[in-house]
Image (cartoon, grey):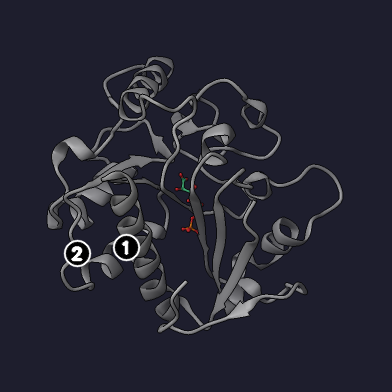
Amino acid sequence: MAPRRVVVFPSSTELGPVLARLVTSRAQEAIRSHGRFTLGLSGGSLVSMLSRELLALPGLDCSKWVVGFCDERLVSFDDPESTYGLYKSQLFSKINIPESGILTIDTSLLVNECAEDYTRKLKKAFPDDHFPVFDMLLLGMGPDGHTCSLFPDHPLLDEEKKIVAPISDSPKPPPQRVTMTFPVVNSARCVAFVSTGGSKAAVLKGVLEGREGPAFPAARVVPTHGELFWLIDEPAAASLTIDVERLGSGAKL
Ligand SMILES: O=C(O)[C@H](O)[C@@H](O)[C@H](O)[C@H](O)COP(=O)(O)O
């Protein structure tokens, strides 16, 4: 297990460019080693940060990228809640990723079937893996410590067999979603959380420094063989007492 790196930036302005370069450096390594780069995306504020920062890089080539979604809300793609819809308008429509390289859910299905269909798509994209091994997953963390659509105290936290699970009682709307499970998340070669803002400070302390009682879902992200980054800003880091790295926009991870 690679050591966890907790990296603090003055603000998201400095964090953004470092995140984009981390993604493209892992993409280059993956393409060199096995011919493609598989990336799992999350929603929230990550969508606009990642899109903006990737598009600012000169010569971005995504022709060998395969992207999936760490979780997705079961709403139509033109709904403002659709994570795919947001990435489509802010990123996919502006880069040279092939249509076949974007693994989406089928929003016409009921939630259980949607999870089964998305499982089939992932199995097809990762035919050699028991659990898909993504080169990189980008995750966010909610104020309750959830990540993907894995919420505190939910039975899905203990899912050990499924690749993708349906959830129809998400405490955060919309209630119907599909989510990657922990076995998939923890199989990734690299996982990077992005978490910014003072509203995350208390939960981030509980996630990174432990707490009494059950661990927050985000704290259960510990890649078995992969790297783990927590990219955060000073307001989010305000309550931490652990050693962290403090870096600026020119850093290379
Ligand atoms: O599916 C969702 O409801 C969101 O995508 C959610 O899981 C988000 O990733 C976190 O709440 C972090 O969001 P922020 O980065 O915007 O704080």
Whether residue 87 is situated above or below residue 205 in the rendered picture:
above
What residue is disc 2 on?
A: 60
Residue at 28% over, 62% down? 51
The residue carrying mark 1 has its beta carbon less than 8 Å from ligand 1:
no
Determine the secondary structure under disc 1: helix
Give the SS element for disc 2: loop
Which residue is found at the position 72% from the left and 75% from the top? Answer: 243
Image coordinates for residue 89, horizontal then vertical, percent:
19, 52
Task: For marks 2 and 1, give the CA distance.
Answer: 8 Å
- Where in the figure is residue 65, as x and y percent of width and height? 25, 47
Q: Nearer the viewer, residue 91 or 184?
A: 184
- Can you say whether 51 is above or below 134 in the image? below
In the image, residue 114 above or below residue 247: above
Residue 181 position (above or below residue 60): above
Q: Is residue 205 visible?
A: yes
User: Hey, what amino acid is under mark 1?
Assistant: Thr
Compared across the picture, whether 114 is left or right of 202 comes to left
Q: Nearer the viewer, residue 108 or 54?
A: 54
Residue 251 percent across, percent down from the top left: 45, 80
- The residue positioned 64% from the left and 47% from the top of the image is 222
Q: Which mark is residue 151?
A: none
The answer to whether 232 appears left or right of 177 in the picture is right
Q: Which residue is mark 1?
A: 24
Q: Is residue 171 left or right of residue 119?
A: right
**Label 2 or label 1, whichever comes before in sequence order:** 1
Which three-letter amino acid code belongs to the residue tagged 2?
A: Leu
Quadrant hosting residue 66? top left
Residues at discs 2 and 1 in contact (Cβ within 8 Å): yes
